[in-house]
Image (cartoon, grey):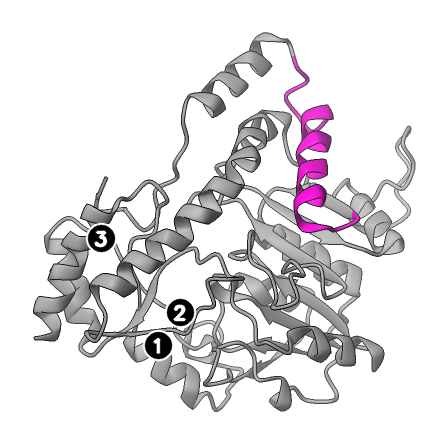
Amino acid sequence: MLTKNSHMNPVYGKEEIESVYDYVNSGGWIMEHTKTRELESLICDYTGAKYAHMVTSATTGLLCASMVANIKPGEKFAVSAYTQAATCNGAILMGGVPVIVDVDPFNYCINFDKIPSDCRVIFVSAINGRYPKDVEERIKSLRESGKIVIEDSAQALGSRTVNDVHCGTIGDMGVFSFGAPKIITTGQGGCIITNDENISKQIHAIKNFGRTVKVGEVYNVMGLNFKFTDLQASFGIPQMKKLPFIVQHKKQLFKWYRKHLKGVVDFIPTDLDHVTPTYPEILVSKRDKLVEELRDEGIGCRAVYDSLCNQPFHRKWKADTPVTDELASRGLHLPGQFNLREEDVRKIASIVKNHAA
């Protein structure tokens, strides 16, 4: 069903409603406890990660990862120009200085060849689940040279590399989002995954006020409260169980857009054998006018991210990002919620065709 928020609306059904209802009626603890552990276990099983930690959001997850990386005041770190501000804001909050790196014109991921050698911490964003084909080699090389790699995988649950390795499991840490418009949702929420036991212990302490013991008020490290709730987890568990179906339909949705807009617009290259796109993305002339035309018909859509160095708060960290600037001038997210059908896509495509004509 198309609505003015079709690019953002979460989709859920009786399974999620009944799960939350049953949990509340059971007298569950509500805050983080056994249901959260169950959800974390499902995420590990699906992604292949050894450890998963639910947090309040991907934003706080990225802050927590920055704390684990121990970014120092005045320390430079690398971040893609094409990403959401939350990717780097946690590191900035710690006093870090972002070095904004333009993207590769072939995949719109961070251009690994342009990452400065003096950046110890690297944030790599898998926007819409996309990574370059050689991402595993690239990240491995960075880590072997002593770098800490944090994957912003907020939009990448269900996306894998060409070698079938799940996004978020390649670097030192990966962070997923479970906000409303993501692949699955818990309303708000995020998850940090890692394969490193020591990092896992640090995450557990930092998200729990700095506690490093199971019982007692002992705070051995700097920590905050990033804890999840079992109430959200009871919603997320049936969402995770639906994930294979959601992944399949998201890919089919993208194929319908390609079918009905073939030769009309350019699509951002997306390998559907491995990528589960959160949104179908196109490149189109007079993009802002098309946004108005779609919204006039009650159809929600959104321009892609502008270059991070063009954001009002981040302008002080100047950078040359011509590839991201070009992408930002033409890129558009079309509706992508997983309950849309081909007739919905056909209607959207007709408006895009009229615009292109």
**Dot label at residue 345:** 3
Q: Which residues are magenta?
A: 28-50
Please provide percent x and percent y for residue 128.
47, 62
Identify which amino acid the numbered label 3 is placed on: Val
Q: CA distance from mark 2 to mark 1?
A: 6 Å
Q: Earlier in the sequence, mark 2 or mark 1?
A: 2
Label 3: few (<14), some (14–19) or many (≥20) C-alpha neighbours in 10 Å: many
Residue at 76% x, 79% y: name it. 142
Please provide percent x and percent y for residue 120.
76, 78
Residue 114 placement, left or right of 259? right
**Which of the pair 330/351 is nearer the observer?**
351
Q: Is most of the magenta stretch helix, strand or loop? A: helix
Q: CA distance from mark 1 to mark 3?
A: 23 Å
**Which of the pair 16/222 is nearer the observer?**
16
State the quadrant of the N terminus: top left
Label 2: few (<14), some (14–19) or many (≥20) C-alpha neighbours in 10 Å: many
Magenta stretch: includes residue 344: no
Can residue 84 be spotted in the picture? no
Residue tagged 2: 305
Disc 2 vs disc 1: Cβ atoms closer than 8 Å? yes
Determine whether the residue tagged by mark 3 lies in a helix, strand or loop.
Answer: helix
Can residue 26 be spotted in the picture? yes
Residue at 28% x, 47% y: name it. 6
Residue 4, above or below 326: above
Residue 213 placement, left or right of 210? right
